[in-house]
Each structure stands twice: as C-alpha cells, then as structure tokens.
Image (cartoon, grey):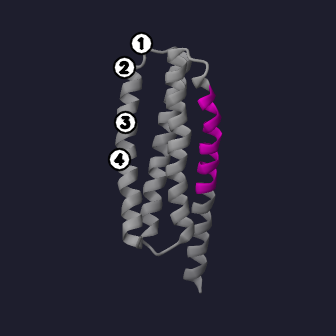
C-alpha cells in the first residue's frame, strides 16, 4: 500500500470512527440511559470518550504520514485502530453484558487492557516518529 493510500485510509477510518463515536455517545445519553445501571452507563461513556480521543490521534497520524514514509507512523495508526476496537469495543460489550446481567459475558473485560497497551504503544510510536523526522530535517 503506498503512502497516499495509507494516510487517507487512516483519515477515513478516523472520520468513520468519529461519526460512530458521536452516534454511540448520543445512544448512551438518550437510549441506553434507561436500559442499564448508572455503573454500566459510566463504563459505556468511558469507551466513547477514549474512542473520540484516539480518533483525533489517528487523524493526526494520517496527516503526519503525508510528510513521508515512516514505519513508526504506520504502526502508530494501526495501533490506534486496534486500541479503539479492543479498548472501546470491549467496554461497549461489557456495558451490554452488565445490562443483560450475564456473568459469563463479563469476562469480556479482560480484553480492555490489551486495547490500553495498544494506545500506549501508539502514542510512543507517534512521539518516536516525530523525533526521527526532526533528526532527518536537521541533517
């Protein structure tokens, strides 16, 4: 996949995940509020919040990728996407498991930290790629 396709892919995915975040936020505020406990709603809201934070990080990664091929940026973008899916996705699933009062489904919460690790790694790669770009420009 060439650089243009990768950066536009990251930006398109960020835009779609941003739209989904707004839809889920509205659903949580209006439709879900009467269906689940306050604790479950709080879990859902954390998922939406982290999704939206990382949508902006993914869009930034796509924009920065336009400045040149940087493998660290490519992996940062991939990890931001994986983090959103694993972290926020598992919190959404956990919310529904709490609402359904199904203890077996509560085990989905084990996935959440893996998403958090993806977020941390993505942020580190984003920082490292910027440092690498800066060093190249100084030469």
Q: Residues within 10 Å of mark 3 (few under 14, many from 20)?
A: some
Lateral position of residue 70 relative to residue 3, left or right: right
Looking at marks 2 and 4 on the same chain, the residue that comes earlier in the sequence is marked by 4
Mark 2 Cα-neighbour bin, 10 Å: few <14, some 14–19, many ≥20: few
Residue 34 - label: 1
Nearest to N terminus: mark 2 or mark 3: 3
**Residue identified by numbered label 4:** 16
Frontmost residue, 133 versus 33 = 33
Tell me the SS state at disc 1: loop
Residue 99 picture location, percent across and down: 50, 17
Residue highlighted by disc 3: 22
Split into 4 quadrants, where in the image is the N terminus?
bottom left
Residue contact at pointers 2 and 4, CB within 8 angstroms: no
User: SS for tag 3?
Assistant: helix
Q: Residue 31: which disc?
A: 2
Query: Label for residue 53?
Result: none
On whether residue 115 falls in the magenta region, the answer is yes
């Amino acid at each position: 996949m060439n650089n243009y396709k990768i950066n536009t892919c990251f930006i398109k995915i960020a835009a779609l995940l941003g739209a989904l975040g707004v839809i889920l936020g509205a659903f949580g505020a209006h439709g879900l509020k009467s269906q689940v406990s306050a604790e479950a709603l709080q879990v859902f809201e954390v998922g939406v919040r982290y999704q939206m934070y990382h949508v902006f990080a993914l869009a930034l990664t796509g924009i920065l990728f336009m400045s040149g091929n940087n493998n660290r940026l490519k992996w940062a973008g991939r990890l931001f996407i994986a983090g959103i899916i694993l972290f926020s996705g598992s919190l959404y699933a956990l919310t529904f498991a709490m609402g359904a009062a199904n203890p077996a489904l509560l085990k989905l919460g084990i996935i959440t930290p893996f998403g958090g690790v993806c977020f941390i790694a993505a942020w580190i790669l984003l920082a490292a790629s910027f440092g690498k770009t800066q060093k190249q420009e100084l030469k």
